[in-house]
Image: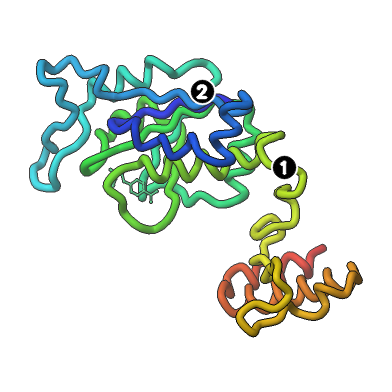
Amino acid sequence: MKIDVLTLFPQMFSALNESIIGKAQEKGLLSINLVNIRDFSLDKNKRCDDYSYGGGAGMLMSTQPLFDAIHSVKGENSHVIYLSPKGKLLTQDKVIELSKMGKDLVLVCGHYEGIDERIIELCIDEEISVGDYVLTGGELPAMTLIDAVSRYIPGVLGNSETTSVETFSNMLLEYPQYTRPAVFSGLSVPEVLLSGNHAEVDNWRLEKSLELTQKRRPDLYEKYVKNSENT
Ligand code: 58G
C-alpha cells in the first residue's frame, strides 16, 4: 500500500520507522512518501501561513503551497483525506474500508487554525477525525490512521497477532490477558486459563468481554445485543 503524507513537519513521522510499521516498510508492504508542503512555497521566505478573511481566529495554512503539494502526488487512483476535528470519526469499520479500497491514500496534515475551505472543495475526498479533541496539527491523527490501516495489510502482522478476534472486530472490548508468571505480586492468573480446556477458556473470555463492555462502553454493548438478536 502506498501512502503520501503532506505535512510541514515530515520529521515527526520518524515514529513510523519503529516496530511493526517500520518492519512493514522494510518488507515493502507499506510505502510512505513524506512530502514537505514548505518545499512548494513560492513565497520568498517560504512562508506557509496566512491571515484569515473576516479576521480573528489566528492563521491558516497558505493556499498555494498546499494546492501545489497535493497536485504533485494526486493521481487517478488517489483517495485524499484531510485529518480534521470536523471529519467523520475514524472507526475500526472505516479502517478496514480504507485498507480494502485498493487506492493510494494521500493524507493532508493541517496546522495553525486549518486550511482554506476551497482546498477541501477542490482536492479533498473525505475529512476524517480520530476523536473529539483538537490538536495543533494533523500529523498525530495521520500516524494513527496509518498505523490502524497498516494492521490490515496482509503480512504486516504475524499469525499470532491476527486481527480477527480482538477488540472491535466483534464489537466487544477485549477480555483481560495474562502472561508469566502464574502468580505475580500475590495475584494469580485465573484458574480457567491454566486448565487447558479451550471451550471453557472461550466461555470465560466472552463472559469477561461482555461484563467489561457493558460496564465501560454501554453504547457498544447495546449495539452488540441488538446485533445478536438479529443473527
Ligand atoms: C480546528 C483547529 C479545526 C485532526 C485546527 C482544524 C486535526 C484534531 C484532529 C484544525 C487537528 C482530529 C489544524 C490543526 C487540523 C486543523 C489540525 N486536530 N481530532 N488539528 O482528528
**Residue placed at 10% from the left, 41% from the top?**
54
Q: Position of residue 124 (x, y in %)?
A: 40, 31
Disc number lying in front (2 or 1): 1
**Residue placed at 35% from the left, 37% from the top?**
12
207 to 52, vertically: above or below: below
Q: Position of residue 37 (x, y in %)?
A: 29, 24
Q: Amino acid at mark 1?
A: Gly
Quadrant location of the N terminus in the rendered image: top right
Q: Residues within 10 Å of mark 1 (few under 14, many from 20)?
A: few
Image-based side of 200 in relation to 150, left or right: right
- Of residues 21 and 112, which is closer to you in this image? 21
In the picture of the structure, the residue carrying the numbered disc 1 is: 158
> Quarter-wise, where is residue 38 in the image?
top left
126 to 213, vertically: above or below: above
214 to 50, vertically: above or below: below
Which residue is situated farthest in the bottom direction here?
A: 186
In the picture of the structure, the residue carrying the numbered disc 2 is: 78
